[in-house]
Amino acid sequence: ASRESTLQPYAVGPDRDPPRPLRAPLGLFGFGLTTALLQTINTGMVENQAHTFVWAYGFFFGGLAQLVAGILEYQRRNTFGTTAFTALGCFWMGLAFYGTLETAGVAEASAQGLQVVLALWGIFCVAMWLCTFNTSVALSTLLASTALLFFFLSGGQSNAVLLKFAGGWGLLVSGLAFYTGLATLMEETYGRSILPVIPLGAPKKLHVGASSASKPDGTTLAQTEDLEISIEHKY
């Protein structure tokens, strides 16, 4: 007589991993460097002709590098990192493409259109910031300051003083991105935290439910285990 046994899978709730913080220094450095390049023009530190370099680096390091970082975060099943890096990478690629067309005289500059685009990206960053309260102070501050930067840049399209202020603010945002990226890179390199990022939120707990199996004689053996898994976010 053949024996058959069936093992039902564990029921795990919730069925998704909790949000994880960004852990891709490549994307953070790409965002920080290209943001700094653009804001040096807005602050008047360099001439407007430097836009050519900004669009080139914006497309590749600001856009493509962040897109790659988003793919890497997807492989880690990090929905938050995937969304943030992919979206901001596409923003930089779009902005660089538009800037290139404008510089070449193919497209006309539209101050009002750019105001709307920048304001919408500010709203997007606010939405992302709302998802950072169980990550770290460094990451949460970075997203909040990035949202403000977009709003400042939006208003600065019709106000030269505000645009110059936005440029200075953008340099601070760039510094935050570099700091967060460096903190992540150093910990992954040395295996310990060197630059503090100050974790936020309490450890998350998942409860693993029951499993059941059928005995050879047809009766059902039900065995219930409550396993408590603590997941601590370090960033």
Image (tube, rainbow, N blue to C red):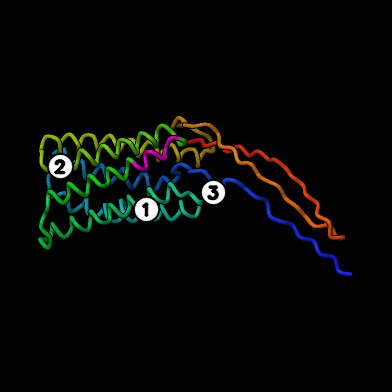
Rounded to the nearest angstrom, the CA distance separating label 1 from label 3 is 20 Å
| Place of residue 208 in the rendered image (x, y in percent of width and height, measured from the top left) | 66, 44
Asked whether the beta carbons under mark 1 and mark 3 sit within 8 Å of each other, the answer is no
- Which residue is nearer to you in this view: 68 or 152? 152
- Whether residue 45 is visible, yes or no, is no
Amino acid carrying label 1: it is: Thr
Counting residues from the N terminus, which is met first, the one under dot 2 or under dot 3?
3
Residue 222 seen from this side: yes
How far apart in space, not on screen, are marks 2 and 3 (Cα)?
47 Å
Q: What residue sits 39% from the left and 33% below the top?
A: 138
**Is disc 3 placed on a helix, strand or loop?**
loop
**Magenta-highlighted residues:** 127-133
Residue at 48% in and 49% down: 78
Q: Is residue 47 magenta?
A: no
Q: Which residue is mark 1?
A: 86
In this view, the residue in front, 55 or 213, is: 213
Q: Which residue is mark 2?
A: 46
